[in-house]
Image (cartoon, helix red, strand yellow):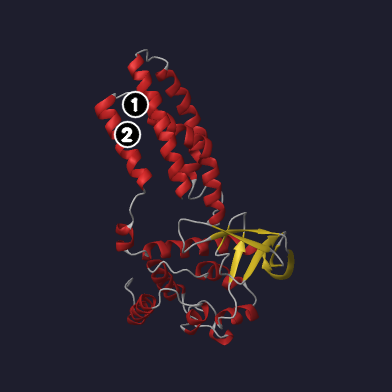
Amino acid sequence: MDLAFTPLQDELRGQARGFLEANAEPTWSQLAELGWTGAAVAEEHGGAGLTFVEEGVVHEEAGRALLHAPLWSTSTLLPFLPAEDQAVVAAGDASWTLALGPLVPDLDTAMHVAVVGGDTIWQLDGAEREILATSDESRPLGVLSGGEPGRALCGSDVLPSLRTRSLAILALEAVGVAHTKVLDHQPSVHTLALLGYNYWSADRCNPNSVLGMMYTLEVIASVYGGTFAEAIRQSLLLEGDRGVSFISSHATMDAEHMAELRQILNTISDEAAHEAIVNSTLVNFHYFTRMFESI
């Protein structure tokens, strides 16, 4: 079996990369002219009629360029829309996002919103949008209020297939993120300060200060682990604990760790050790708070 890309697929990658390097913020109409908005749409409906491999090449390059457009959210829902809606998307006159929870992706750019109600996925009409500030400006989130179900788009029985397609596209975008983009990322001043303090405190002050750092981590994980897991699950359209089991497990597991850590702390009687642990706990909570505020 030949798993190499074909010359046509390599040419598509080169064209996509060249376009995105020359156009950092392309319009939806420009993406439609390239055939990207209708990549999964059959040619008889005005689309490009590409296979998922070619479509995946486009999503890799979109991820590499950190494209700010509702390409993922639209592409996720596109194959399940009625043929006439697929044609409108392919022409660049519509884009979509699907609201499966409180946090809705691409709400700042998607023209239409779909919602699940009973055994049907509906177009949501008349809803107000509030766009939230996110650390990744290429993947903004928002919340909806009000609105009423409009026309039916498809049955909700497509949700398992829709989720699989969504995760595959997200994975392709992640693969496409350029290595230089990762290297260019710098930790925040709060992260650097926290790391520096913990090394200094354990090495130069009192080694027991590590227990203050551990206490802070266990508290944060046990209190917020489940909340973080649920937010990730909803924003990425995940089902069950798939993809978030490590984070969600800390909600209960770290409660047990807290009990074990409390037993260890109760065995320490040295006043200098007590002071080091308390100071470390206060400093770690301070900088973790600053880190979360900056996200």
Amino acid carrying mark 1 in the image: Ser
Along the line of sight, which residue is nearer the eye, 267 or 128?
Answer: 128
Q: Residue at x 47, y 43 (%)?
A: 247
The dot on residue 209 is: 1
Counting from the top left corner in percent of width and height, residue 170 is at 46, 62
The residue most toward the left is 204
Q: Residue at x 59, y 55 (%)?
A: 103
Label 2: element kind: helix
Counting from the top left corner in percent of width and height, residue 175 is at 37, 63
Amino acid carrying mark 2 in the image: Asn
Q: Residue at x 40, y 24 (%)?
A: 278
Q: Residue at x 35, y 39 (%)?
A: 194
Which quadrant would the N terminus be assigned to in this image? Answer: bottom left
Counting from the top left corner in percent of width and height, residue 282 is at 42, 30
The dot on residue 198 is: 2
154 with respect to 224 (left or right): right
Counting from the top left corner in percent of width and height, residue 79 is at 57, 73
